[in-house]
């Protein structure tokens, strides 16, 4: 086997994998669109994305806890390598999770105080 094949495969393999995933996502979107249009044509109300339910304080707490703990786990795992820029892989999700938690506690305090406070 010629040694020039290995670098070529190393370059082409990620491109092929990303292309396959991209095509798969597009096909799923097309099928979803056709299904939605068929439901509308038959007079059935397609299920909408309920944004109000996705932004409840409970979901903020869940997202915050999960993201913070995943970031902490990544930080501890990557910390075994040593201190370096790779720690951002754990610090960024950890602080995004902390932002979710701050948002949860801020909205809960505001709801408890009522409109006058």
Image: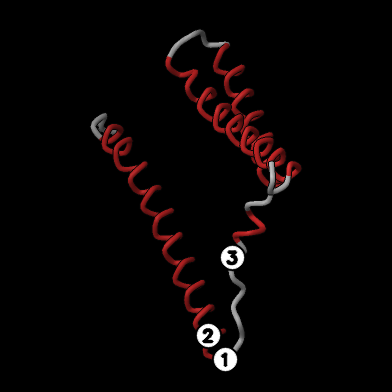
Closer-to-camera residue (116/55): 116
Q: CA distance from mark 1 to mark 2?
A: 6 Å
Reading the chain from its start, which is encountered first: label 1 or label 3? 1
Crowd class of label 2 (few under 14; some 14 to 19; many from 20; radius 10 Å): few
Secondary structure under tag 2 reads helix
Q: Is residue 110 left or right of residue 93?
A: right
- Tag 1 residue: 42
Secondary structure under tag 3 reads loop
Q: Residue furthest bottom?
A: 42
C-beta proximity under 8 Å, tags 1 and 2: yes
**Residue 49 numbered tag:** 3
Crowd class of label 1 (few under 14; some 14 to 19; many from 20; radius 10 Å): few
The answer to whether 92 is drawn above or below residue 49 in the figure is above
The answer to whether 105 is drawn above or below residue 46 in the figure is above
Quadrant assignment, res 53: bottom right
What residue appears at the point 69 percent right and 41 percent down from the top-left corner? 117
Quadrant assignment, res 69: top right
The answer to whether 77 is drawn above or below residue 19 in the figure is above
- Tag 2 residue: 38
């Amino acid at each position: 086997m010629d040694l020039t094949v290995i670098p070529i495969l190393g370059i082409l393999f990620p491109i092929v994998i990303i292309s396959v995933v991209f095509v798969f996502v597009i096909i799923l979107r097309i099928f979803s669109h056709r299904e939605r249009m068929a439901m509308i044509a038959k007079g059935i109300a397609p299920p909408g994305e309920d944004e109000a339910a996705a932004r409840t304080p409970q979901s903020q707490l869940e997202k915050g806890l999960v993201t913070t703990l995943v970031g902490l786990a990544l930080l501890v795992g990557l910390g075994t390598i040593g201190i370096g820029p790779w720690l951002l892989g754990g610090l960024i999700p950890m602080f995004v999770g902390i932002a979710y938690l701050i948002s949860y506690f801020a909205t809960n305090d505001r709801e408890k105080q009522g409109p006058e406070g």
